[in-house]
Amino acid sequence: MVRDVLILGFPGIQALDLVGPAEVFTGATTYLAAQGRPDDGYRVSVVSETGQPVATGSGLALVTQTLPDPQHPVDTVILPGGMGVVDVCKNPDILNWIQTVAQNARRVVTVCTGAFLAAEAGLLNGCRATTHWAFANQLASEFPSVRVDPEPIFVRSSANVWTAAGVTAGIDLALSLVEDDHGTDAAQTVARWLVMYLRRPGGQTQFAAPVWMPRAKREPIRAVQEAIESEPGGLHSITELARRAAMSPRHFTRVFTIEVGEAPGAYVERIRTEAARRQLEETDDTVTVIAERCGFGTAETLRRNFIRRLGVSPDQYRKTFA
C-alpha cells in the first residue's frame, strides 16, 4: 500500500527541512517502482492552513494543499522548522490539527526547529529530543519537560515521534525511515543518488560553533580563564590554576565552577579541543604536532578526546572541515 506522507507548510519555513525529506521519499518511490513494487512507495503532499502557496525563508514559493482531515489515518507527518515556527506555535488551529493527526499517524517527524511545534503540541512531554544545535538551549528553556540532547543527528523520541537536528539532518532521518520501511538496499541507493552518507559519522557537535562560557565576575577567575584561552597548551593543572588565582585548590575549584558553570578541568579540555579544531581546519600540521601544541600530549589522547566530545576522529574532522 502506498504510504501517505504529509509535510506541514507555513510562511517562513526552512526550504531544506521540507525539500530534503521529500526528495528522499520520492527517490525511494522511484527505486521501489524500478524493483517492480510501485504500490510500496510514498505519496508526498505539502499541506498548509490555507492551501495557498507559502513562501520559504529564502523567498521560494511552495505549492500546498489544504490541511486534510486529521482524523484520517496517515503514515508519516513531517513538521519542518524555520523562522515561521514562532507564529505557528501561536496558532491554535494548527496546533489542534497536529495533536489530532498525531493520534492517527504511524509516525511524526520533526526537523530542526519543527521540534518546537511538537513540543507546543505536547508530543514531546517527558521525551528525549533533539533540534538544531543553535536552538537546543532555547527548546530546553521553553519546554522543561523535554529532555533536549543537542548532540544526535536524529533521535527516536517516543514510540511514534522522531526528532532531527537542523536542516540537512532531515535527509539523514528520512533515509533511516526508508531503511526501516524497505531495507538497507533501498535507503543506500537513495543516499547514493543524493550523494549522501547513509549514516554520516559523528553527531552535530562537530558542526556547532564554539560555545564560550561567560566571563566570571571575580577578577582572579577571569584572569585564569584568559590564561587558559591564550595558551591552551600550557600547564593548567588545578594546583597551577589555583596558584594564579591565589586560592587553595579546593576553594578555587568550587569558586571556578560556580562562576563559570563548568569545572576547571572540563573547561581546560574544552578550550584545548576548540584550539585543536581550529588548527585542524586552518593548518597542515600533523595531528601529533597539534596534540602537543594544544596540551593533549599525544595524538592518541587527542583522538580519544575528539571521539568522546565530537563523535569523530581528528582525521575525519579534518577531511570534513579543512
Image: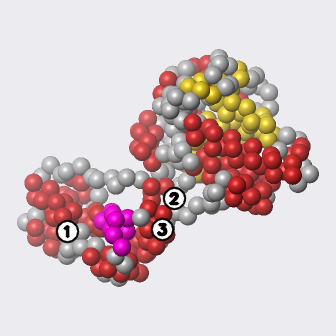
Name the image quarter holding residue 78. top right
Q: Earlier in the sequence, mark 2 or mark 1?
A: 2
Q: Nearer the viewer, residue 9 or 108?
A: 9
Q: Check the image and name the residue furthest to the left.
A: 246
Does dot 3 land on a helix, a strand or a loop? helix
Tell me the CA gap for discs 1 and 3.
Answer: 26 Å
Left or right of 60 in this view: 206:
left
Left or right of 236 in this view: 159:
right
Tell me the CA gap for discs 3 and 2.
Answer: 15 Å
Does dot 2 land on a helix, a strand or a loop? loop
What residue appears at the point 56 percent right and 30 percent down from the top-left corner? 60
Q: Residues within 10 Å of mark 3 (few under 14, many from 20)?
A: few
Residue underneath mark 3: 319
* Pointers 1 and 3 in contact (C-beta within 8 Å): no
The part of the chain drawn in magenta is 274-284
Residue underneath mark 2: 203
Query: Is residue 62 one of those drawn in magenta?
Result: no
Quarter of the image where the C terminus is located = bottom left
Expressed as whole percent of the image width and height from the top left, the position of residue 220 reads 10, 58
Expressed as whole percent of the image width and height from the top left, the position of residue 152 reads 53, 55
